[in-house]
Amino acid sequence: MDAFHSNSNPFLRGYQQLSINRLLLITFEDDHPPVYRPLHRSQAHLYDHEVQCFPCIFCDEFALITEGHHIRESLQDQCTTDGIVRQVVYEIVGTDLEGRPVRIGDAHSLHEAEAVVRRLSFDTGHFSRCWEISTAHLPEADLQFLKQLASTSTPCGLLFEAFAIPYGGIGCKLIGTPWTDQNLDLIGKPSIEAFREELIEAGVSEALFRVLHLAALADVRVLIFDPLAKELPGLPVFGEEP
């Protein structure tokens, strides 16, 4: 299966699409567990200390602080339950490797939540944008193709540059990642399928394109193939038949 038709990408790790939701932890009737609700957008400007420990009304979608605030009758009619805001929490959410929503955890302040998101998202690029995988993930012909590119110069427009590594390794610097239709359009490239055809015409094999595309989708910038590196589970392995 081609890389752009696959829902599984072994280069992806951690959580994707991280975001922060400001929620109110609300208690109400004694025999009911607390609930979490966002503030209505009309009160989103309120500071945490203007919300915490104040009475509120709420529905399934939002909550409104009642003390010291005029609330439109139309909004009051939607909120049928009274409660007390016990705490303001900042919920950190994302998606897993299959694209499903995941609740990662809570923080007690926006600053703390932003710090967690910053650590999980590897914004500096020092941790998540370089991979070393086994040369077994490419046929020998593809390794020779990359070595030939590294010994001369990679043609312009391929969105990757090959470079040699001592003792048998070969590296690829990926450009314009992630390789999605939207991002390729921003840098003046066609759709990913048209770009794939462009690479195939330039001599890139289906196997090499698949690996490079999966890495580029995960926003990898440097991909190193080394005979001593470990194999990456989920990628095809090429070699001699037993």
Image (cartoon, rainbow, N blue to C red):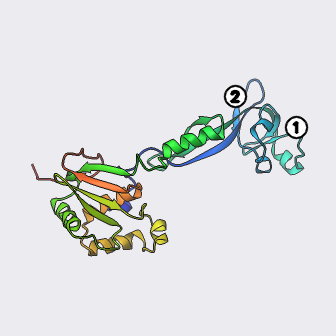
Which mark is first along the chain, 2 or 1? Answer: 2
* Residue 32 appears in the picture as rendered: yes
Q: Residue at x 20, y 52 (%)?
A: 136
In the depicted structure, whether residue 178 falls above or below residue 131: below
238 left or right, relative to 90: left
* Residue 237 appears in the picture as rendered: no
Give the CA distance from mark 1 to mark 2: 23 Å
Image quadrant containing the N terminus: bottom left
Residue 120 in picture, x, y percent from top left: 49, 43
Q: Look at the numbered disc 2 and give the secondary structure of its residue.
A: loop
Label 2 crowd (10 A; few <14 / some 14-19 / many >=20): few
Which mark is in front, 1 or 2?
A: 1
In the depicted structure, whether residue 114 falls above or below residue 7: above
- Name the residue tied to disc 2: 33
Q: What amino acid is at disc 1?
A: Glu
Tell me the number on the disc at residue 67.
1
